[in-house]
Image (cartoon, rainbow, N blue to C red):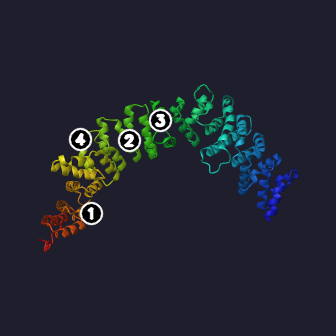
Amino acid sequence: MKDALDKTWNILTNTPNRAAVAVLLSALKSRHIEIRLGAIRSLVLRRSVEGHTEIIRRFTSFGELEQAELADAVLHSAHHLKSALHDAVLAEHVELCENACHVILLGKVYDTLPTLVKAAENRSHRHSDQAAATLVQLARVLHQEISGESHQRTCDPFFMRRHVLVSLERSLNQYHVHHRVEIVDAFLHLVPQDNAMLALILNDPRHSCHQPIVASLSTSAVTPILNLLSEMLQDAQSPGCILQIIANRQDRKFLNHLLGRVGLPMSLRVAQNMKRLTSIAWLQQGREVLPHLEGPAQAAAVEFATASNINHGDVFQLLSFLLKRGSPQGRRASCQALARFSDPPADQLILAALQDPDPSVKAAAIRQLRPRRLPGAMEKLVSLLDSPAAEVRDAARSSLSEFSFFRYQSLFESLEPAARRTTGKLVRKVDPMAVRRLAEMLNSPSVATKRRAIEMVAAMNAANDVCDDLIGLVEDPDLGLRTSAVAALGHSTSANALAALRKAESDPQRAVRDAAQKSVEQVYKNRGSALPSDAFTGNAR
């Protein structure tokens, strides 16, 4: 049955016999939905203005399924209906023009944009307003295809844009006649930032479209216009009035969009444009909007401020403001930007940022402690090495980078015993590779290197960190190394270290046995527990 019906639709669609149109129109009244849907598709596919006009006329009588079928058919063959839609839009018939506008939007018939422009321009046309509204809506839908927001691409949107911009540009030159703001809006929905007509209008305050375009760019919150402003900020040839619009707008949606789209790090072109600005409302008197922006937008705002040519004091006030009221990302960016300021008020902000609950903000402040030569900076950094936050520990380590293992190793011989211990413990905390380097030294083929490593282990209080490597030396053939390794294990609290020491109590050499006994006592002391009464029974020789 289905095959037979499909064959019938194929014949009615492709036959040159004009009587097929009447048959299909009659089928639109069928009680069966499948027949009505098939008739709609066949009428759209036939090259019959009469059939297309009737489809448009009956549009409001179609249910949801019929409209969906019509939309799908038009999407795949929009050029078939172009002539009928053109005539319907320009017609004086109320229902026909309104229905045509609905079909245009439903089927995304972009080819009718010039027709909508013509109808919108004609103020005497009874449906000029309807055409103007449809024009803006259709331009918005085409923009979604250009930007990739649409899930379905119905044409080459960039080719279509070039095609329809011709009509829109021509109409803008007649703005003084028709005063249709909708045509301006449709143009701004579709125009690329490097369009010659757009540049001409923006650079000529006397052009009849200059003020309407500036007004729309200054107030509209629709995505296409926000995109356009963002793109123009990245254009080295952007007109001055565009930069002033960007500087003066303070609405949250615009700022979130602009700052989020431009992103970080800031491009050279954006930085050059920002340098042209000496006043930016949303960074100065209108900065109250900033805490309400998204975190990345706040961080970008800080970079915008430092790249601009606004007053140095205003930049500092902005950073101070965001450090108190910004998001973690905004506070971190503000803290980092304070590196440009070296006066006491900036120092106070850095010290305050050390108490920030967010580790990334605190880390940004930590990295500025020593460059600012703040009192007690070293003590603060050393205490922060024990922070539970990895970012804070890393920042403290980077600020104490001179306390590296290799530098400590090279200076070890020249240091006094007290300095060896003080510096060694700090190196162990600061240099994340210190323990690994110690282990490498303990496993060196050189006896001298191993001895030096054992001395460094004791100075750095690192016995627990390299316990297994020390245990490996307890049976070394070199008596001095064995004795030193056993002595060093006394600073450990490890069960493995204790077991190795108990074994060393039976060493053939008395020096090793004595060292083992002392180390066992030290291990128990380190553990805070009493030495067993029979700890050394039978071990002495």
Q: CA distance from mark 4 to mark 3?
A: 38 Å
Residue 226 sits in which quadrant?
A: top right
Disc assigned to residue 268: 3
- Mark 1 residue element: helix
Q: Disc 4 vs disc 1: Cβ atoms closer than 8 Å?
A: no
> 10 Å neighbourhood of mark 1: few (<14), some, or many (≥20)?
some
Q: Is residue 347 above or below residue 240?
A: below
Q: Circle 1 sits on which residue?
A: 468
Of callouts 4 and 2, the N-terminal one: 2
Q: Earlier in the sequence, mark 4 or mark 3?
A: 3
Q: What's under tag 3, amino acid-wise?
A: Leu
Which of discs 1 and 2 lies nearer the camera? The answer is 1
What's the amino acid at mark 4?
Answer: Pro
Nearer to us of marks 3 and 2 is: 3
Horizontal and vertical percent for residue 414?
Answer: 18, 46
* Precedes in sequence: disc 1 or disc 2: 2
Estimate the spatial distance between the alpha carbons at disc 4 and disc 2, rounded to whole Å.
22 Å
Q: Are marks 4 and 3 in contact (CB under 8 Å)?
A: no
Residue 20 lies, in percent from the top left, at 86, 53
Q: Quadrant of the C terminus?
A: bottom left
Amino acid under label 1?
A: Asp
Mark earlier in primary sequence (3, 2): 3
Q: Name the residue at 46% across, 39% down.
A: 266
Q: Residues within 10 Å of mark 3 (few under 14, many from 20)?
A: few
